[in-house]
Amino acid sequence: MASDKVLSMEEVAKHNTKDDCWVVLYGKAYDLTKFARVHPGGAKLITDAAGMDATAQFDPIHPKDIMDKLLKPALTMGVVDPATIKPEHVAKAPEKHKAAPKKKKAAAAEASDEVEEFKKPPLAGMLNCFDFESVARETMEPQAWGYYSSGGDDEITLRDNHLAFQRITMRPRILVNVREIDMTTQVLGVPASLPLYFTATALAKLAHQEGEVAIVKAAKKAGVPYMLPTLSSYTLDEMLAARAPGQQVFSQLYVNPERSRSEEYVKKLEDAGVKALFVTVDAPQLGRREKDMRNKFTQQGSDVQGDDEGEGEVDRSQGATRAISSYIDPGLCWDDVPWLKSITKMKVLLKGVQCGEDAVAAYEAGLAGCVLSNHGGRQLDTCRPGIEILPEVVEALKEAGADKQDFTVFIDGGIRRGADIFKAVALGAQAVGVGRPVLYSLASYGQNGIVRMVHMLQDELQMVMRLSGTPNVASITEKHVLTTNLADHIVPLPVDNLTAGTYQALEPAAKL
């Protein structure tokens, strides 16, 4: 096989053009000629390293094994003899982009030319999830912030994911003994300190150098399961090695067009004792996320757009979502469910179900459950939040004869308060997934930030359960909430100042 061949760096260096582009990463040479055209940072970042060792450029964000996971085996050209690598063969790591300084107010501008630097509040000053988001926005690099915070198109669904919870009102019961509150539960048989898990999010190194490794460790400290992402910044082995003894995790899967890649990955998960596989089904194409796209254009500029864009070969403005989409199979369909079930003994669930009919189809196909999700508002804009879909799905499954023990329903998207967790459980979800709150707390304060974020949600949930007359998770039912206005979208509400204060509005080019 080509991947077993030993190459000299002199041989690799011959492939140094955009039409014949070999790049060395972690000691292996890859043919990235086609990959360069869909690289999120633009082809120039790849082609500038053609014929060179680009490990130093690649390492800050990506895992060591991502090319082996994503590329066809034939594109791994061989192993490079390290003795042949000279200093001139090594591409330099890029300089980090810094966020633009804050603009001064008019009065302050007249009095002083100094720009006040952002001072990060102490961790103890964080009181809610929005606090972490506001700090992350100030501390993250623009590219990372743009990737994490962006939503599809006009970001209607992105915003409605949280606002939908506010269309559900509470119906508390009184004179219930709530001296002791027990939030503990089981998520697919895995013990959890509350009905919550960390859902899969890509490229956590964009938030913090410890990335997914820190999330694994924080999940253990917080007592909740973590769904390992396929598109991680650390290798699967590194994430699994970060587990504490006895710690149980789930995993998310993007099905690769090269099915053998997915089969190898799933086998590795199962051999490592991963408990459940969540197959993402809402991303046959990745959404159009303008904050991410805009950030790429303004950060990189025309010099990085390069020749290939002038020749019309690729739309470079797609930002950090572009490369990923080439490695997700848009042909995945219901006919593939038997194959998915056949390649693993793990519980298999679908992540991204958005209507009752598809939930019933998943149940009838013998799957273990589903996540009602719109991919964090990053895919099809104006589709419904998971919490809004939940009553429809629960009713459809009930009519189909599904039992909660046989088919588990989760939701994700927009969970920012303990009350949001309560409402989801009341309407039939076993637990909720949180993604951005994990990334923002990680970006702001590292592993300790994540743990504090979960503890805040626990404090809020404990209060809501006590005030609602529900001493344990099993006592939370649909009778504790009112959903009359959940689906009509026309209920006047007080302004949510925390959302308004942290949401970064889209702007047209002339305003930038």
Image (cartoon, rainbow, N blue to C red):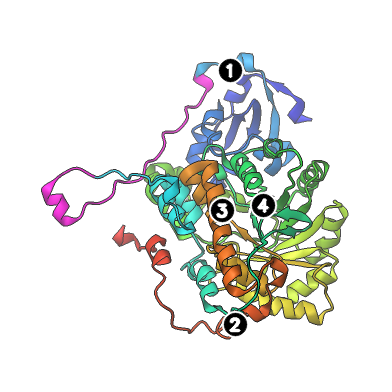
Q: Dot 2: what SS?
A: strand
Up-down: is 17 above or below 348? Answer: above
CA separation in Å, label 3 and label 1: 49 Å
Task: Specify the amino acid type for callout 1.
Answer: Ile
Are there few (<14), some (14-19), or many (20+) residues within 10 Å of tag 2?
some
CA separation in Å, label 1 and label 2: 66 Å
**Residue annotated with mark 1:** 85
Task: Specify the amino acid type for callout 4.
Answer: Val
Q: Residue at x 74, y 62 (%)?
A: 350
Q: Residue at x 15, y 50 (%)?
A: 109
Q: Earlier in the sequence, mark 1 or mark 2?
A: 1
CA separation in Å, label 2 and label 4: 28 Å
Q: Earlier in the sequence, mark 3 or mark 1?
A: 1
Task: Specify the amino acid type for callout 3.
Answer: His
Q: Earlier in the sequence, mark 3 or mark 2?
A: 3
Q: Dot 3: what SS?
A: helix
> Is residue 96 covered in magenta?
yes
Viewer-proximal residue among 3 and 67: 67
* Residue 293 appears in view: no
Range of residues picked out in magenta: 88-115
Q: Are marks 2 and 4 in contact (CB under 8 Å)?
A: no
**Residue annotated with mark 3:** 455
Viewer-proximal residue among 99 and 319: 99
Q: Dot 4: what SS?
A: loop
Please tell me the numbered disc located at residue 482: 2
- Is 172 situated left or right of 140 in this image? right
CA separation in Å, label 3 and label 2: 27 Å
Please identify, in this view, whether the residue under mark 1 or under mark 2 is nearer the observer. 2
Image quadrant where one finds the C terminus = bottom left
Q: Earlier in the sequence, mark 3 or mark 4?
A: 4
**Residue annotated with mark 4:** 224
* Residue 351 appears in view: yes
